[in-house]
Amino acid sequence: MKKGERTKSKIVEEASRLFRTQGFSATGLKQIIDESETPRGSLYYHFPGGKEELAKEVIEQHTEEVVAQMRRAFKESSGAADGLARLLDEFAAQADLGECESGCPVMAISVEAASVSPELRDTARQAYERWRSLLAAHLMVAGFPDKEASALARSMVCMLEGSLIM
C-alpha cells in the first residue's frame, strides 16, 4: 500500500470509529485529522467534498467489508442454513471481542445524516440493499421463493443492525 493510500485508509478508519462512537454530527473534520494523525491537506486531497464525501466512503468501505464477510461465510458452508450460522457466529465473535460495541457506521451515519443529505441516505440504502440481496440470493438457492427470501433477508438485516444497538 502506497503512502497516500495508507493516509486515506487512516482517515477513513478514524472517521468510521468516530461516527460510530459519537455520531456523525458531533464529529468534526478537525477531530478526524487530529485523531488520524494526518495532515489537514491530506483529508481535503482525498475528500474534496469534505465530511459528506468522507462519510460516503466510510459507508461504501464498510459495505464491502460486510459483503466479503458474507461471501466468505457462505462459500465455506455446506448450504444456506450453515452459511447463515457461520455468519452469525462471526458477528457474535466480533461482538465478544468488542469490535461491534459502538455499532455499525452505516447505521450511525444514516440515522443522523439521512434527513439532511439525500446522497448519504441513498448510499446507506444501497448498502442495506446489497446485504439484503446477497442474503436473499442464498436463501433462494436453498429453495425459498423469491418474495419470501427477500422478506426474510430484509428481516435478517434489520435484526443484525438492531442487535448492534442493544
Image (cartoon, helix red, strand yellow):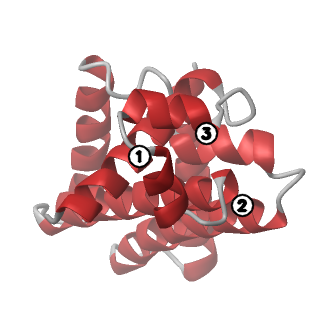
Q: Amino acid at mark 1?
A: Ile
Q: Is residue 38 left or right of residue 20?
A: left
Residue beneath label 2, please? 120
Q: Which mark is residue 11?
A: 1
Whether residues under marks 3 and 1 lie with C-beta atoms below 8 angstroms apart, the answer is no
- Res 31 → quadrant: top right
Which comes before the other along the chain, label 2 or label 1?
1
Position above or below: 11 against 57: above
Q: Amino acid at mark 2?
A: Leu
- Name the spot of residue 91 as percent of width and height, x first: 31, 37
Q: Secondary structure at mark 3?
A: helix
Confirm whether residue 15 shows in the render. Answer: yes
Residue at image coords 27%, 30%: 94
Residue at image coords 48%, 40%: 16
Residue beneath label 3, please? 29
- Res 62 → quadrant: bottom left
Which comes before the other along the chain, label 2 or label 3?
3
Distance (Cα) linking label 2 and label 3? 17 Å
Whether residues under marks 2 and 3 lie with C-beta atoms below 8 angstroms apart, the answer is no
Q: Amino acid at mark 3?
A: Leu
Q: Nearer the viewer, residue 124 or 29?
A: 29
Distance (Cα) linking label 3 and label 1? 10 Å
Position above or below: 138 against 33: below
- Name the spot of residue 58 as percent of width and height, x first: 50, 53
Q: Which mark is residue 112?
A: none
- Name the spot of residue 102 as percent of width and height, x first: 49, 23
